[in-house]
Image: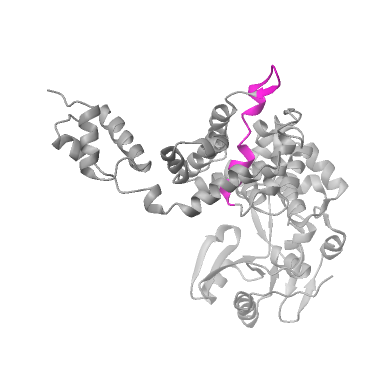
Amino acid sequence: MRTPNDSLPELRANAERIVRMLRDAGHKAYFAGGCVRDLVMGVPPHDYDVTTSARPEEVMMLFRKTVPVGAAFGVVLVILGGREYEVATFRTEGAYSDGRHPDAVAYATAEEDVTRRDFTINGLLYDPVAGKVIDHVGGRRDIERGIVRTIGDADERFAEDQLRLIRAVRFAARLDFAIEPATLEALTRLAPTVTTVSWERIRDELVKMLVGPNRGRALRLLHETGLLAAVVPEVEAMAGVEQPTQFHPEGDVFEHTALVLDALEAPNPVRALGALLHDVGKPPTYTEADRIRFNNHDVVGAELADAICKRLKFSGEMRQQVVDIVRNHMRFMHAPKMREAKLKRLLRRETFDDELAVHRADCVASHGDMTVYDFLVMKQAELPPEQIRPTPLITGHDLIAAGYEPGPLFGEILDAVEDLQLEGTLATRDDALAWVREHYAPPK
């Protein structure tokens, strides 16, 4: 067991200041939740939560800048040093019937407060004044043993908030812990009930998993517990779908996807979802002829990815970016043979960096041939932005001035001119207009 420490002194100092101010006003106050778990594990917390006997209205009177984000549930944000600190009143909660908020909240003692939390590793308190960890639930022992265990009866904890089913997997993957047997049994049995939770909350937990450490293990745990089948059955369908061994010696589509997630560098939500869903079109397009094939799995996959992102309530912009990654991931293999114009259009795509990251992980997790990836990295480095996205030689106004009538043909002409510009065939406005007159006669 490591001594609690962190490397963000200002963040820690402000959190301690909040605790001291609450104490000075006659209230009890401690650090609580994940920050204590991280401190005990020797990991610098990136945020601090405070739990206190002070009621929300007392917290808001004590601090100059506050936001009552969940005052009805005993939660207030205190703004200090430009950062937000969640300050929650000791409380117990009822079930989450709407999948988002507790039905009822009752103020309680510090010990009662921690026993309503989800897992023992998140049920620790820390007194920064005395420098002491307060453990009512056996959390320190479970951290030492590397175990995720519910506080009290697993069925009761999961029934209170079914999102805890997914959170158990996220913590097990992130911390590389095992899920305690009784907790795992209840989790697996209750997995189908997770969809009573709002899709927004499910989405947020999945994103945290996909951009966190041990992403492949997280996916495998979701599969083994039945949560994946309940939340993203399209990905669950990948399990057992064989692939041609000459291209995928690593195994079936599901195992490949787990390995891609692990191989993904600098994951952000868009590229992580792109990695998760890039082969989601393979199960419904599986055929066997001369070999196993997945014809048009990129097109089918894009449609499935769109539906999945809608179900998980992602923004339209993010959904489109993920769909683009899935739809275009097969184009990369042809990059070295592309015409200059087509290659430059690929390089300037808004999602190119994310697509390239998924392509790299895709190769690492299968055949290991990085030829195309290395080619694209080289081209991206050697082609300046003005060559990839040059100022257009002509516009629609130029075509109108030259006697052409606005219409669908404008797009065809302008695209053709831009292709020739990207390939270096046309370099000036006059050259472009001359080429247009030669190939597209204006109406009489």
Residue 378, placed above or below residue 144: above
Q: In the figure, is residue 49 to the left or right of 412?
A: right
Q: Quadrant of residue 224?
A: top right
State the residue in front, 138 or 358.
358
The magenta-colored residue range is 268-293
Residue drawn where x is 76% and y is 62% of the image? 123
Q: Is residue 281 magenta?
A: yes
State the residue in front, 80 or 206.
206
Q: Quadrant of the N terminus?
A: bottom right
Q: Position of residue 243 (x, y in %)?
A: 72, 29
Q: In the figure, is residue 2 to the left or right of 334?
A: right
Residue 169, placed above or below residue 91: above
State the residue in front, 172 or 278.
278
Q: In the figure, is residue 379 to the left or right of 214?
A: left
Q: In the figure, is residue 392 to the left or right of 237?
A: left
Q: Position of residue 302 (x, y in %)?
A: 54, 32
State the residue in front, 40 or 291.
291
Residue drawn where x is 56% and y is 46% of the image? 375
Q: Position of residue 175 (x, y in %)?
A: 76, 57
